[in-house]
Each structure stands twice: as structure tokens, then as C-alpha cells.
Image (cartoon, rainbow, N blue to C red):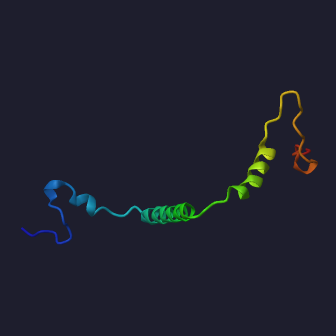
Amino acid sequence: MTRDPVSIMPPSLGLGASLRAAPTGNAWLITFVDVVMLLLTFFILLYAMSRPEPARYVPVAQSYIETFKPVPDDEEPATPPRSYVLEPAAG
């Protein structure tokens, strides 16, 4: 009886077949996810080591507040400029 030189698991465990399975073509996805996680970790570490100045973020926060503030019930919402209003196509 000869053994398969490629198999590292005995066939009685049932794991050898899964190790010899044909690739599905999505192996690049594992590498991509690893790279994305490494980049995310890198930028989190950069931010953690930085010293953010809260005074620099106040204008940005004020801009968000002004842009996304809710409209009171007694006011009409501002109409967008004419160039942004979509009209139905004629015909």
C-alpha cells in the first residue's frame, strides 16, 4: 500500500480531503482583508500617538451643526437652488 506524498493528514480523519480541495478563486480576498486591517491598525496607532488640539476641531464641529441642524416645525425648510431641483423629463 502506497501513501499519497502530498497528504499530511491520514485519510481516516477526513481532513486530508479538505486540504487537497481545489481553490475557489477568492484567495485574494484573504490578502486584501489582511492589508486593510493592517492599514486600519496603522492609522489607529498614529492617532493614538498624536496629540489632537480640540481648538482645531471646533470650526469643523460648528460647520456640521450649521449644516445638519434640524428645521423647527414652524419653519419651512429651505428650498435648494434651482440647479439642484430635478424636473420630470418632458415627453
Residue 42 lies left or right of residue 25; in this view the side is right
Residue at 16% x, 69% y is 4
Q: Which is more toward the observer, 49 or 25?
A: 49
* Residue 65 placement (x, y as % from top left): 77, 45
* Residue 48 placement (x, y as % from top left): 54, 60
* Residue 55 placement (x, y as % from top left): 72, 56
Residue at 17% x, 62% y is 9
Image quadrant where residue 27 sits: bottom left
Q: Which is more toward the observer, 91 or 63?
A: 63
* Residue 51 placement (x, y as % from top left): 61, 62
Residue at 77% x, 54% y is 59
Residue 57 lies left or right of residue 30; in this view the side is right
Q: Is residue 67 above or below residue 6?
A: above
Image quadrant where residue 73 sits: top right
Which quadrant holds the C terminus? top right
Image quadrant where residue 1 sits: bottom left
